[in-house]
Image (tube, grey):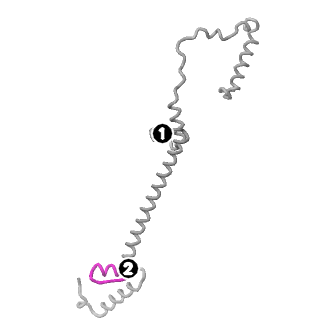
Amino acid sequence: MSSLENMDQAQIYELAKLTKTLSESPETRKELLRMTKKVNPEMVFPELEIEDYTNQKITAAEEKVIAMENKLREREIRDQLESKRKKLKETYNVDDNAVSEIEKIMLDQGITNHDTAAQHWEWMKQAAEPTPTGYNPNAMNKFDLSKYWKNPQQAARNEAATALQEIHNIGRRPIGI
């Protein structure tokens, strides 16, 4: 550290003028005080200490608020999940084990809606209709072939009209119609 003893009056005056300019400028004052505090830690600058103390308290308060908001958000999510589970139990008349299975399906299948997952779960639980086994040689017995012997075109038209009427009554349309 150099001493002022080796400087002439002009240099000391310029140094004092620079320090005064830096300390009076709002943009550089705090930085000058912090640098001075770093060089001479025993010096006390109340405005720096007040600012540091205030910043510490504000930061701590902000952290507490963020933690409380996170806890509140977590509680809201938990409450929503519990209400969805309760709705599942009431709507689909299932127990806790079934709700766990439904939630497992949600995770495995990427389903985000509890109702959709419950419907999927119910469909999975339904037994499929058994397919008939073997050959049924009596399929021709369903048709009255006597009409075909008399007038084959008219019998075919009547059979087609009956089939179309059945399809229309079901409410599904075959491809192309």
Residue 36 part of the magenta-drawn span: yes
Q: Amino acid at mark 2?
A: Ile
* Residue type at numbered disc 1: Asp
Q: Would you say 148 lies left or right of 11 here?
A: right
Q: Residues within 10 Å of mark 1 (few under 14, many from 20)?
A: few
Coordinates of residue 42 in the picture (x, y in percent) = 27, 82
Q: Main secondary structure of the magenta part?
A: helix
Q: Residue at x 54, y 40 (%)?
A: 116
Give the magenta-colored segment's residue range. Answer: 31-49
Residue 50 marker: 2
Classify residue 164 by image quadrant: top right
Judge left or right: residue 2 versus residue 141.
Answer: left
- Residue 53 rendering spot, x and y as whole percentages: 37, 76
C-alpha span from label 1 to label 2: 60 Å
Mark 1 sits on what residue?
Answer: 95
Q: Could you say whether the residue bearing mark 2 is in a helix, strand or loop?
A: helix
Q: Residue at x 35, y 79 (%)?
A: 49
In which quadrant of the rendered image does the C terminus lie? top right
* Image position, residue 171 (x, y; %): 68, 29
Q: Which mark is residue 144?
A: none
Q: Residue at x 33, y 92 (%)?
A: 13
Count of numbered tags? 2
Q: Is residue 37 magenta?
A: yes
